[in-house]
Image (cartoon, grey):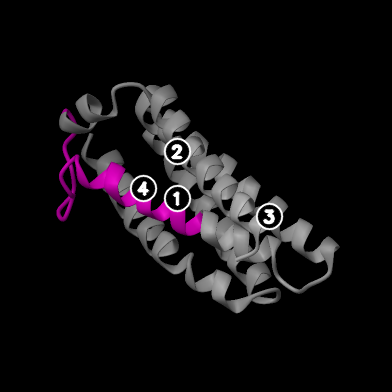
């Protein structure tokens, strides 16, 4: 890894992790809200979420870094990274909508939009650097599981 790219790598990781931390901060007392909900089967304990999201945000950041440093036209890479940032913005909003405002029905729409954006991002990434796609497969799977949890929680509460 070249010196300049080490800085880029670090910046992608820090910036993406900060999105998650900031979203959690704006969402309020997530743990207390989650504890008070009736949850569908297979709902994980509270402590799983920050661990999983920390790992997933790092993996997402690695994929963005791979796209930024891919041997591809700048315009194509910029379009892919704009889509990355858009899905990250929608990701940021979900916790706030679900936990702070407790709009669980709206959160279902937001998470469905997020799944669509992540799939579109992965398709775009595939045309630039296939390895960047692989870093997002766990993210997509977790979003599908989170969609199930969101729908189940909406129906039970």
Q: Which residue is mark 3?
A: 4
Q: Is residue 123 above or below residue 75?
A: below
**In the rendered structure, which disc, 2 or 1, sits on the residue that comes first in sequence?**
2
> Residue 93 location in percent, x, y?
51, 34
Q: Which quarter of the rendered picture does the C terminus lie within?
A: top left
Q: Residues within 10 Å of mark 3 (few under 14, many from 20)?
A: few
Element carrying mark 4:
helix
Q: Are marks 1 and 4 in contact (CB under 8 Å)?
A: yes
Left or right for 91, reference 105:
right
Question: What residue span does the magenta drawing correspond to?
Answer: 36-60
Residue at 36% from the left image edge and 53% from the top image edge: 55
Q: Which residue is mark 4?
A: 53
Q: Are marks 4 and 2 in contact (CB under 8 Å)?
A: yes
Q: Are marks 1 and 3 in contact (CB under 8 Å)?
A: no
Q: Are marks 3 and 4 in contact (CB under 8 Å)?
A: no
Closest to the observer, 152 or 25? 25
Q: Which residue is mark 1?
A: 57
Closest to the observer, 3 or 43? 3
**In the rendered structure, which disc, 1 or 3, sits on the residue that comes first in sequence?**
3
In the displayed image of the protein, which residue is found farthest to the front? 3
Q: Which residue is mark 2?
A: 20
Q: State whether residue 116 appears in this view.
A: no
Closer to the eye: label 3 or 2: 3
Q: Residues within 10 Å of mark 4 (few under 14, many from 20)?
A: some
Q: Which quarter of the rendered picture does the N terminus lie within?
A: bottom right
> Residue 16 location in percent, x, y?
52, 44
């Amino acid at each position: 890894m070249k010196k300049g790219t080490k800085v880029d790598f670090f910046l992608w990781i820090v910036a993406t992790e900060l999105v998650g931390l900031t979203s959690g901060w704006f969402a309020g007392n997530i743990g207390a809200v989650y504890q008070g909900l009736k949850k569908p089967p297979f709902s994980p304990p509270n402590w799983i979420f920050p661990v999983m999201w920390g790992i997933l945000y790092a993996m997402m950041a690695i994929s963005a870094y791979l796209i930024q440093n891919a041997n591809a036209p700048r315009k194509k890479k910029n379009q892919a990274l704009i889509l990355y940032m858009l899905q990250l913005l929608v990701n940021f909003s979900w916790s706030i909508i679900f936990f702070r405002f407790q709009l669980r029905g709206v959160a279902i729409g937001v998470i469905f939009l997020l799944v669509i954006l992540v799939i579109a991002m992965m398709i775009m990434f595939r045309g630039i650097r296939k390895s960047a796609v692989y870093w997002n497969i766990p993210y997509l799977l977790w979003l599908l599981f989170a969609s199930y949890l969101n729908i189940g929680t909406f129906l039970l509460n």
